[in-house]
Amino acid sequence: MHESPKIFYGWYILFAAFFVYALGHGLMFSFGVFLKPLSENFQWSRSLTAGAFMIFMACRALSSVVMGGLTDRFGARAVVVAGGLLMGMGTLLGGIMTSVWELYLFYGVLAGTGMGVVSVPLSSTVSRWFVTRRGLTQGVLVVGAGLGNFAVAPAAGYLVLGFGISDAYVILGAISLICIVLLALVLKKEPAEIGLQPYGAPTKGALETRELQKGHPETLDVDWEISQALHTPSFWLLASVGFIFGISHYITTTNIVAYGTDMQIPAATAPLLLTLIGGSNIAGVIVMSLVIERIGSHRSLVLCMGFQALAMFWLTWAANLTHFMVGTLIFGPSYGGMVLCLLVITPEFFGLKNLGSIMGLIFFIHLMGGAAGPELGNLIYDLTEPHSYSPAFFLTGCAATAAVVLGLIMRKPQHSASP
């Protein structure tokens, strides 16, 4: 009999996925740092410049569906390698762009398509490696996203100030390409691939006992087919909440730096708002992982969405650095908590067998909200006189309030037992 490894290989999977999450989300959130400099340097309107992020999110959304399905079949390694190449090349090529269509192609299409490998393939892979620590491990991934906000995006701001737009894109692209491809080599589809069981997986006999079922409801996942999931109200309510969350999430992370500088916050200071979002997101994920254990992912989702609404209304009236700091400290934990809730509640509702595909569809709808939010915010900015982001944030707060109501209505779907 072979001796079990001292360190379960799933922890290496989680380590690699964590840093891919951080790098990918750091590249994505850094667009908020580039938005105003690109607009001013090339004399593009902000809504025209933000169109690149809309294309990025649309391509990411479509890619998430495809990549989720490919991960279900082939595993995450090859999928994430391909995504890392696309993200890195798309960012690198930003160093030679001179027109808006190049920004749309390089950042929007190439980097956006590559970003599709970050959330769904990695979270579904980690879910297959862990049973009793599934909520914790998904929380670690969301902390990785917060780390991208906390470190990579503000670093991009300093690169722009110190080296200019072109060199900043080249440096970010080279680092992300090399690191993501190397990290992807650690990934494996599932424990059975190397003769292991998922972490905390119970024996068949134990699964049949009532006591263990009550103690570990996460082991009772019922596997749904995609067609079955699409016919449940629960899927569409969850997806609708995710769509509105996408609007509020990305309208903030994309525009907060430009919004702050418009309100006379210095250009060297404004990127620190993303650092606050990232740092408070990390703290929020840690707290929400404990809250989910106590009150469940469903109630936690409603709670987080309520704080999203509060953050949007607060930022509507922000007029100085202190106001913005308070708003980001409300927003950061709620956004991290919402991502964690979506990652945990999806396998709870629909099981693991088709998790990559079902989660891919939910995140597709969520990311379409993310595509619409920044473009809508900048379109409203361009149309208002004097120019302001306040009306866009107010409308987003109203939408987030509606999402709270949808979350209260939502229930776990009931799957008929097979005869």
Image: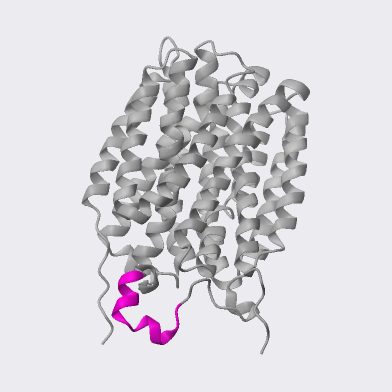
Where is residue 300? Give x, y as percent: 33, 48
The question of residue 205 being in magenta is answered with yes
Image quarter where the C terminus lies is bottom left
Q: Is residue 80 left or right of residue 290?
A: right
Image location of residue 222, percent across then percent down: 35, 73
Residue drawn at x 60%, y 21% as measured from the top left: 36
Occupied quadrant, residue 385: top left
Q: Residue at coordinates 74% horizontally, 48% vertically from top-left?
A: 177
Work out whether 54 lies above or below 256: below
Identity of the residue drawn at 41% across and 17% down: 318
Query: Residue drawn at (55%, 54%), measured in percent from left and top?
Result: 63
Q: Is residue 28 visible?
A: no
| Residue 220 on the magenta segment | no
Q: Position of residue 21 (x, y in %)?
A: 60, 49
Compared to residue 270, the image places residue 281 above or below, namely: below
Quadrant into which the N terminus falls: bottom right
- Relative height, residue 137 to residue 170 (above, below): below
**Callout count:** 0
Q: Quadrant of residue 261?
A: top right
Taking the view exactly as shown, the residue that stands out farthest to the bottom is: 1
Please, which residue is most extreme toward the left here?
Answer: 409
Position of 306 relative to 47 (above/below)? below
Q: Nearer the viewer, residue 362 or 11?
A: 11
Depth order, front residue of 140/206: 206
Q: Is residue 105 visible?
A: yes
On the image, the x and y values in percent for residue 339 come to 44, 48
Q: Nearer the viewer, residue 161 or 344?
A: 344
* Most frequent secondary structure within the magenta stretch: helix
User: What residue range appears in magenta?
Assistant: 202-215
In this picture the colour scheme is one colour
Q: Quadrant of residue 248?
A: top left
